[in-house]
Image (spheres, coloured by chain):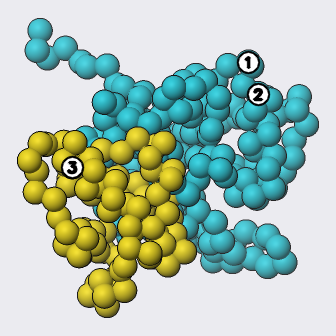
Amino acid sequence: MSDEPKDVPLLSRNTRLRPVRLSDYESLFELVSHTEATNRWRFRGATPSPEDFREMLWRGVLTQFVICRKTSETPIGLITAFDVDYTNNVVHLALLLDRTVRRTGWPLEAAIVFVNYLFEHWAFRKIYVESVEYAARWFRRAATRRLFVEEGCLSDHEWFAGRYWDVHLLALHRERWLEESGRYLKAIAPN
Amino acid sequence: MTRNAHVLSFSEFSQRLVLEMELGGPPSVKALEPSTSLHLDLGLDSADMLELLVVLDEFGVAMDESVLSRIETMGDLYDVYAFLVTE
């Protein structure tokens, strides 16, 4: 039947999302524990023990995947949907990328795939991303482009490196996604 | 990718890129040369590079990560574009 739902792909031209495996924890612990990532990611400077890390990695999580190159099993990142609010149909997104691939752009294909997965599997109205002033400049750049919009700013909210920094709350609305996702999904489609 | 596709000149290519990616308007066009670094001179970050993939797809070119990872300058980018669009 033509109205049968289609599978939601977890693959892009250059990346693949796969479930977290027990064997991934050491690699993910290394990724999260890197100084730069530690300050910017969900743990915000906390350094859990390897034992606590496993539990903390899943705290408040709705769904998360390891990001790999399409042809490799080695994690180059982790993408997470957490703090889901079913009353208001919103969820938060966090992205962690290995610093060696962060600048190249193609790993963000995984974020596009993941957002598509979230909007296809749940009736979310919005996906939120928190962006600290000193970090994740790309999220704010994205906000000024086609996908995210800035919906709030917590002034001088977060302490790091001797001062307080603003935290920006960015939102990707379902309507915006439906309007704009086609060009992104086409461009990153697996060949 | 299309055989016999029209290949933009470097100037046309860079101007369209500036326009599509909102890289700063006409003054930036004059500054774009083959040696212009995407990261150091234009300040492109990962979100920009993702947007670049989308724009290149609209030009009829799709790039794999092994190629993307080696592109540092506008000249590198144009050379890959010109090769792939006629492949």
Residue at screen point 81% across, 56% down: A35
* Depicted B51 relative to depicted A26: above or below: below
CB-based contact (under 8 Å), mark 2 and mark 1: yes
Query: Would residue A38 appear left or right of A99 to someone viewing this image?
Result: right
**Which mark is on residue B85?**
3
* Residue A120 visible in the shown view: no
Instruction: Note the chain letter of the yellow one.
Output: B
The amino acid type, in three-letter code, at marker 2 is Tyr
The amino acid at mark 1 is: Leu
Where is residue A40? Give x, y as percent: 70, 58
- For disc 1, the marked residue is A22
Q: What residue is at 30 percent from the left and 44 percent from the top?
A: B62
Say which element carries label 1: helix
Q: Where is residue A54 drawn, in percent x and y?
A: 79, 28
Residue B35 picture quarter: bottom left
**Label at residue A25:** 2
Q: Which residue is more in the foreground, A74 or A162?
A: A74
